[in-house]
Image (cartoon, grey):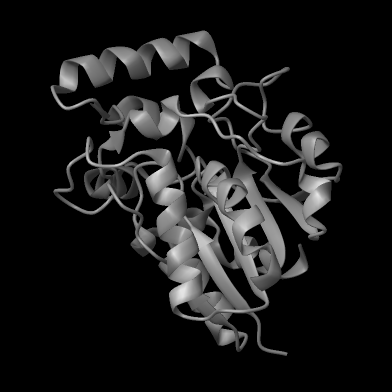
Amino acid sequence: MTDTYVLITGAWHGGWAWRPVAQRLRAQGHRVLTPTLPGLHDGADPTAHSLHDVIDYVVDFVERADLREVSLLGHSWGGYVITGAASRLAPRLRRLVYWSAFVPADGRPLLEEIPEDHAGMFAQLAEASGNNSITLPFEVWQHGFIQDAKESVQRLLHSLLIPQPMGYFADGLDIPPMPSLGLPVSYVYSTEDIALPPGELAWTPRFPERLGVTALETPGSHESCFTRPVELADALLKA
């Protein structure tokens, strides 16, 4: 059976980041679309859009292509995007999949879902940028996001990251309860993901519990789309 996947990246990434995973899914016979979201193109103005504009873009992307029976997947910050789009796209969706992703609570922005020192760092970086964007420091990326790659790979991928509009982290969502959408929902967790620290603010069990599901585990870091793409793709197929 051929499925249609729309894969939504996390912060600092474009659709290019899904290529290793998308190749694996396509090799299994599936249709895979990997849009780059507004504000995350090279050279984009990080002040031009809000989180709600990004959600509008994803809704329009799916409707314009008349996609149906879609598996809509979000990574990290992309959990906000797919959650915001889900109620508007529900008749076109087969399921929602969160991979090491935020599952937003009603009205709570991402900045309220992360440790205070993380939020403070983002605020300082955005203020220093001159355009309210966040460029992730290499050392933070290296040790917290992709610690399972060689340094040469870490540096190459870091050079491809796009400044993240701070506004995307500061906006909350007015969302209906997930069960009311009547959609199957899954949560996939990379077991070496330390982008959020252990404890009450970790990815699990906090976010799977918000969905009322048990997380499906897959090996790798927060960036296992690069470091463990085969295993990640296989986990997405199982989700």
Q: Nearer the viewer, residue 68 or 14?
A: 68
User: What x and y, as percent, mark residue 181?
Assistant: 77, 54
Residue at coordinates 66% horizontally, 38% vertically from top-left?
A: 103
Judge whether 164 appears above or below 130 on screen: below
Indicate the quadrant containing the C terminus: top left, top right, bottom left or bottom right.
bottom right
Residue at coordinates 68% horizontally, 77% vertically from top-left?
A: 69
Q: Is residue 47 left or right of residue 5?
A: left
Indicate the quadrant containing the N terminus: top left, top right, bottom left or bottom right.
bottom right
Residue at coordinates 58% horizontally, 26% vertically from top-left?
A: 196
Q: Residue 132, located in which quarter of the rendered image? A: top left
Residue at coordinates 49% horizontally, 21% vertically from top-left?
A: 111
User: What x and y, as percent, mark residue 143?
Assistant: 43, 29
Q: Nearer the viewer, residue 183 or 101?
A: 183
Q: Is residue 60 left or right of residue 207?
A: left
Would residue 204 be seen by someone viewing this image from the given angle? yes
Judge whether 208 appears above or below 195 on screen: below
Would residue 9 be seen by someone viewing this image from the given angle? no
Q: Residue 128, located in which quarter of the rendered image? A: top left
